Amino acid sequence: MRQFKHVNKALGVERLELVNGTASLHIDQIDSLNRTIEKLDAKGERKITQIESETATVQNETAKFKAKSLRFGEALDSIDPLVKAQSTVEKKIAAVRAILSAKPGVKLDMDLNDKQPGSKEEQLLAKDLKSVDWETIDALEHNKRADDIKRN
């Protein structure tokens, strides 16, 4: 004898009586079965709505990430043609490092943590910082784009 576990559960019975391969249901049993299906349908609709909402959120965040990545890539590419020629972000960063390491540096003959107020070292450091042309540095196109990326 075949039994239908889920139908039986929805009807609140242990088994259906079959007569000549046919099961009969009372109107109360059909109402009960209908209510169970409605609950399942409503639960499924809520789940679909939740999944659609989560999907929209993920798509929105993905679009934002792609836009930021694009701006970051453009900012990197504007540094130097060597950087722009690289195929991956990792290679671009390595190229930036190579470019920066090729620039001459200035060695300070002092320990910045060991200076006394008004000392010769502090005066030299203050003079060096004053001689930096920050307006020109801030006006460079790649620095403007980098500032925009930080703000977003």
Image: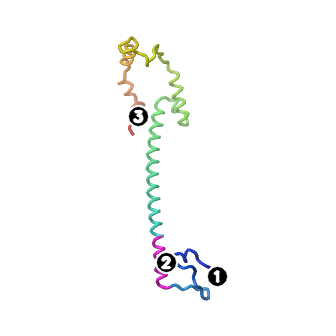
Q: Is residue 74 left or right of residue 18?
A: left
Mark-to-mark CA distance, 3 and 1: 75 Å
Q: 137 or 21: which is nearer to us?
A: 21
- x, y (%) of residue 67? 44, 43
Segment tinted magenta in the rendering: 26-39
Q: Amino acid at mark 1?
A: Met
Determine crowd level at label 1: few under 14, some 14-19, many 20+ residues with C-alpha closer than 10 A. Answer: few
Q: Which residue is mark 1?
A: 1
> Which residue lies under the disc numbered 2?
33
Q: Residue at x 47, y 40 (%)?
A: 69
Secondary structure under tag 3 reads helix
User: Mark 3 near mark 2, Cβ–Cβ under 8 Å?
Assistant: no
Asked if residue 16 lies left or right of residue 77, the reply is right
Please state which amino acid type lies under the numbered disc 3. Answer: Arg
Q: Position of residue 119 (x, y in %)?
A: 38, 12
Please name the predominant secondary structure of the magenta segment in the image: helix
Residue 27 on the magenta segment: yes
The amino acid pointed to by label 2 is Leu
- Circle 2 packing at 10 Å, graded few (<14), some (14-19), many (20+), is some
Identified at 46% across, 80% down, the residue is: 31
Residue depth check, mark 3 versus mark 2: number of the one nearer the observer: 2
Q: Is residue 57 magenta?
A: no
Name the residue located 46 percent from the left edge and 15 percent from the top edge.
108
Image quarter where the N terminus lies is: bottom right
The disc placed on residue 145 is 3
Residue 1, relative to residue 82: is it above or below?
below
Distance CA(mark 1)–CA(mark 2): 21 Å
Where disc 1 sits, the SS reads loop
Q: Which mark is residue 57?
A: none
Asked if marks 3 and 1 touch (Cβ < 8 Å), the reply is: no
